[in-house]
Image (cartoon, grey):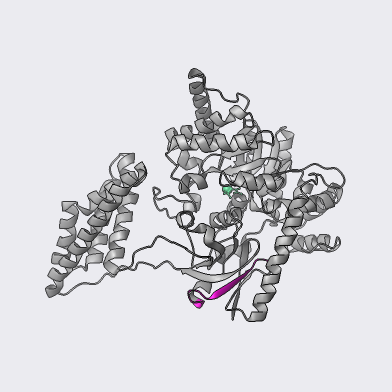
Amino acid sequence: MIELSGISSSPGYAIGPAFIYRHDKLVISHEHIKNDEKDSEIKRLEACFSSLTREFDYYLKNAETDSEKALYTVELLMLQDVEYHKSIKKLISEKLYCAAWAVEEATNEIIKAISKIDDEYIKERIIDIRDIEYVILGSLSGKRAEHIVINDKRILVADYILTSELLSLEGLENVVGIVLDSGGKTSHVSILARSKGIASLVGLKNFSSLIEESDIVVIDGEGEKAIANPTEDVLSLYRTKIKERELRLKELGASSDLKNYTKDGKRVILDANIEWLEGVDDAVSSGCENIGLFRTEFIAIKEDLLNDRSKKDEVYLEAAKKMKGRGHIVFRTLDVGGDKKTGEMEAEDNPILGWRAVRYTLSHKEDFKAQMRAVLKASKYKNVRLMFPMISGIEELDECLGLLEEVKDELRRKRIKFDENMRVGTMIEVPSAAITADILAKKVDFFSIGTNDLIQYTIAVDRANAKTNYLYNPLHPAFLRLLKYVVDTAHDNNIEVGLCGQMGGEYKYLPLLIGLGLDEISMSSQSLPIIRRLLNSLSYSDCLTLLNEVLSMTSYIEIENRLKEFFNGRNIRY
Ligand code: PEP
Ligand code: MG
């Protein structure tokens, strides 16, 4: 039996055989070949190119979307490019580079040349060229990245997993749990796991290399550990825990008649975060008042809707229609980039600080406007709000609002109905936005604080990096002060302020969030019934006193201890 501790990133227990997925690192050997090996190395290269050409030709003929077609076309052009072949062969025959090294060198030369061309479209092809280089090198070394297919109920165990890999995984419904060696609980893979109700653990160090395919794995979300090859006793203990948890959740779900007030009458709106259209049903059955955050990028990446405008219209209309008569729905414009890269996006040295969210959409204005148009069309149901992610200052916000006005004018001209009073908000998730909250508040109807990012950027700690997870702490005094400043500033400017990061769904932080006076908290549908029950049992005046005490403390350890005391005094497990 092997037992390793990690961090629970999506609650619950799970038992199942492991499906292990490890990323092979492509190590390119920089070795010289012998003079008499030149011909065989060139033959090996030619065989690799012709089999890849046949393969990509097949993909192109069977491609379903325009973006797939464009990708395969570029890759085929590259595979058949005479100059490319020539320069690789020259490096092999004249400099005696091995084939992989020659491919790497020749590709770098092409990319260097392309980078100098002043044309955005051509520059954007660099990612496609890197992609085909990866395929060629993989093929030469016999290691090709596979498409993940899971056919029976499994626990997915991996060194790490990319959001795009998880989204394209075939048989996601068969994944009963996820255990990752790396990652953090607010990474987008974790968010995805929560939205699908898949128990998951991250930061398990080297778990994936300690176990074998099909070993039985137990995920203990409460104890934050994974166990491989458990004894019969351990297995039966966890089978009981799974049953008990199911019962407890059913009971909590059934208590959705409880109202969203503290016991001394302070109202806090409780909303749900969703990532898919189907998420609306889960949200409604959790008893949410509104959808406080629709992370539209998930569906866009999965269904290739980044550029497919008509389908986007359909999805947004359907979501707004489903919420009609229940509450509103906040569509957040695409937050791609960071740990949510699509195939079209270039690799960056610091993606978390890079070309993400509005930074990306503002450089793809027509697509950005198309998304706003789709949201505006859905606003005909009068329950739609729009929100911008990763705003870092007034200039960006003004640019987004300017584009929105352009789209509204266009719809008016075409006599297409939309809600003229649609409320528009911004996320506060970059410290510069939080610090200038007084300036931004004059421009929007509401704020939604994205704590996942605001913590990462305030403390300068990557939210998905297991090595530095110990620093990622919502109780850091700097972060709590920043939260207080944003909430107070929003209220001084008479706008609503909510919070939609993972912190809102974790009950141990709720007393502080109530004390802060947030108008709304939006969280995963799974967390909502538990948060509501706790909200009903706490009093605002106690929470306010607690918050004020905590704000005068100097370290998160002191704050954490005070919170534990607060819960112990009420017989609630911290
Ligand atoms: C956040 O940053 O808290 C947030 C809600 O946005 P996301 O998790 O999608 O980055
Ligand atoms: Mg965010």
Question: Compared to 185, does 288 lie above or below?
Answer: above
* 485 left or right, relative to 31: right
Across and down, in percent, residue 118 comes to 30, 39
Q: Residue 292's quadrant in the figure? A: top right
Please tell me in which quadrant of the rendered image residue 321 appears: top right
Q: Position of residue 383 (x, y in %)?
A: 64, 32
The residue segment tinted magenta is 210-222
Horizontal relation, residue 409 to residue 139: left or right: right
Residue 394 in view of the camera: no
**Number of labelled discs?**
0
Question: In the rendered image, which quarter contains the C terminus?
Answer: bottom right
The answer to whether residue 215 is above or below residue 316 is: below
Residue depicted at 47% across the width and 63% down the height: 150
In this picture, is 309 found above or below 255?
above
The residue located at (52%, 28%) in the rendering is: 402
**Magenta stretch: residue 214 in it?**
yes
Q: Nearer the viewer, residue 451 or 502?
A: 502
Q: Residue at x 40, y 60 (%)?
A: 147
Image position, residue 424 (x, y; %): 61, 32
Whether the magenta-drawn stretch holds residue 534 is answered as: no
Task: Say left or right for 98 vs 532.
Answer: left
User: Where does the image place residue 376, in percent across and percent down from the top left?
Assistant: 55, 29
State the quadrant of the N terminus: bottom right
Q: Is residue 342 among the parts visible in the rendering?
A: yes
Give left or right: position of 69 versus 37. right
